[in-house]
Amino acid sequence: MALVISEQLRAVFNNSGLSQRKIADKLCVSESTISRWLSGQRKPREICLLSVRKLFNLDKNYNTKPECYSDGSERRSNGLIEAKK
């Protein structure tokens, strides 16, 4: 569940060229929080996901279309893929 979100965040963050520290500063979270998101240990809150979209100028529809996948996962309203429970 959180692992898929972490992969999506990792792609966005890596494409930005910013360090984890710089991203953490811009999102007003700790560097360890960013690390936990990227490792899949924690899932970002909705407000943090909104901040990520704003910071990286992602379209408001970025990954928000509801879809189901063959592995049973589904796309949630926060726009990121989450494994079906």
Image: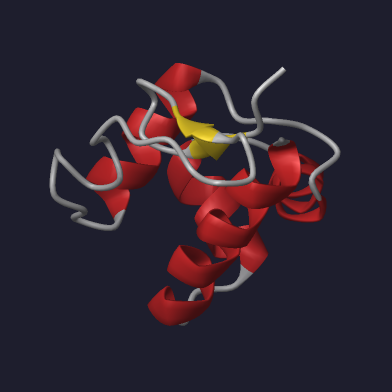
Whether 35 is drawn above or below 22: the answer is above
Left or right of residue 46: residue 84: right
Whether 17 is drawn above or below 59: the answer is below
Residue 75 lies, in percent from the top left, at 43, 33
Q: How many marks?
A: 0
For this rendering, which residue is in front, 27 or 15?
Answer: 15
Residue 65 lies, in percent from the top left, at 23, 36
| Location of residue 20 by image quarter | bottom right
For this rendering, which residue is in front, 5 or 54?
Answer: 5
Whether 23 is drawn above or below 73: the answer is below
Q: Which residue: 21% across, 53% down?
A: 58
Left or right of residue 68: residue 85: right
For this rendering, which residue is in front, 34 or 7?
Answer: 7
Q: Residue furthest front?
A: 70
Whether 51 is drawn above or below 31: the answer is above
Q: Which residue: 33% across, 30% down?
A: 50
Residue 85 lies, in percent from the top left, at 72, 17
Quadrant for the N terminus, please. Answer: top right
Q: Which residue: 59% across, 65% down?
A: 10
Q: How is the image coloured?
A: secondary structure
Left or right of residue 2: residue 44: left
| Location of residue 56 by image quarter | bottom left
Residue 42 lies, in percent from the top left, at 78, 32
